[in-house]
Amino acid sequence: MFVKVCGLSTPESVREAVDAGADAVGFVLTSSPREVSPDQVRILLPLVPEGVHAVGVFRHEDAADAVATARAAGLEWVQLHGHRTAEDVTTVHDAGMRLIRAVTMGASQDEFADMGEEIFLIDAAIPGSGEAWDYASVRAKGLDGREWLLAGGLEPGNVAFAATAAGAWGVDVSSGVEASRGVKDLAKIRAFVQAAKAAGL
Ligand SMILES: O=C(O)c1ccccc1N[C@@H]1O[C@H](COP(=O)(O)O)[C@@H](O)[C@H]1O
């Protein structure tokens, strides 16, 4: 199971996620209690070993603006939430970057089609809200064979159940590994990665 831990802003939290076995770490470069600057990301990046994806997370920004900010941060991966098009995917790829394209369960069927992104992501209605949803309902979307992440309201105690119910290829978490909004809890990060990996789908 691929595991991404998002909303990291301190050396300690990056080290914990990496040491616990996370496959990707996320830096929120958009308005959020977890927002970091490109300069902060540049300081944290040396803590991310080769093979672990370091991802810049965006919400409403144009794809071209997100790419420019991610480049300023030294990142090669961007995660785009919101309504996105095939042109956005092309914008990211033409910049030599790789894409996690995020949708909500309420997105149109067209948005569930494979647009050529490297990884697809299905999230709660409000990204980063910690809001749980009916994870099993995603099975109706027919995502078998796709590389896609389940997100929204996951935590150490429910990640195995949720991932199994949804048939997820991987999982992504932010709120569920925090002591308070925007403040990561190192023990919860470790517990989450271990629980997700143990689910072993
Ligand atoms: O984490 C944020 O603050 C955030 C802000 C804007 C866009 C995406 C964000 N994070 C993504 O939201 C989910 C995590 O949700 P939860 O907090 O675990 O319920 C995940 O995809 C993050 O990458």
Image (cartoon, rainbow, N blue to C red):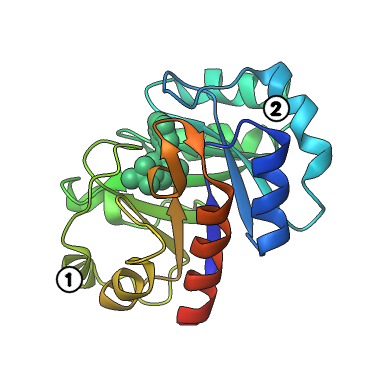
Location of residue 42 in the rendering, given as x and y in whole percent from the top left corner: 77, 26
Location of residue 161 in the rendering, given as x and y in whole percent from the top left corner: 30, 75
Question: In this rendering, does residue 75 appear at all?
Answer: yes
**Which residue is at a point 60% across and 26% down the rendered structure image?**
67
Q: Quadrant of residue 14?
A: top right
**Which residue is at a point 51% across and 80% down the rendered structure image?**
198
Question: Mark 1–mark 2 contact, CB under 8 Å?
Answer: no
Identify residue for label 2. 41
Q: Residues within 10 Å of mark 1 (few under 14, many from 20)?
A: few
Identify residue for label 1. 140
Asked if residue 189 is positioned above or below residue 55 in the image, the reply reads below
Q: Alpha carbon of mark 1 to alpha carbon of mark 2: how far?
A: 37 Å
Q: Residues within 10 Å of mark 2 (few under 14, many from 20)?
A: many
* Element marked by disc 2: helix
Of residues 144 and 59, which is closer to you in this image? 59
* Element marked by disc 1: helix
Asked if residue 134 is positioned above or below residue 45 in the image, the reply reads below
Asked if residue 123 is positioned above or below residue 21 in the image, the reply reads above
The verdict on label 2 being within 8 Å of ligand 1 is no
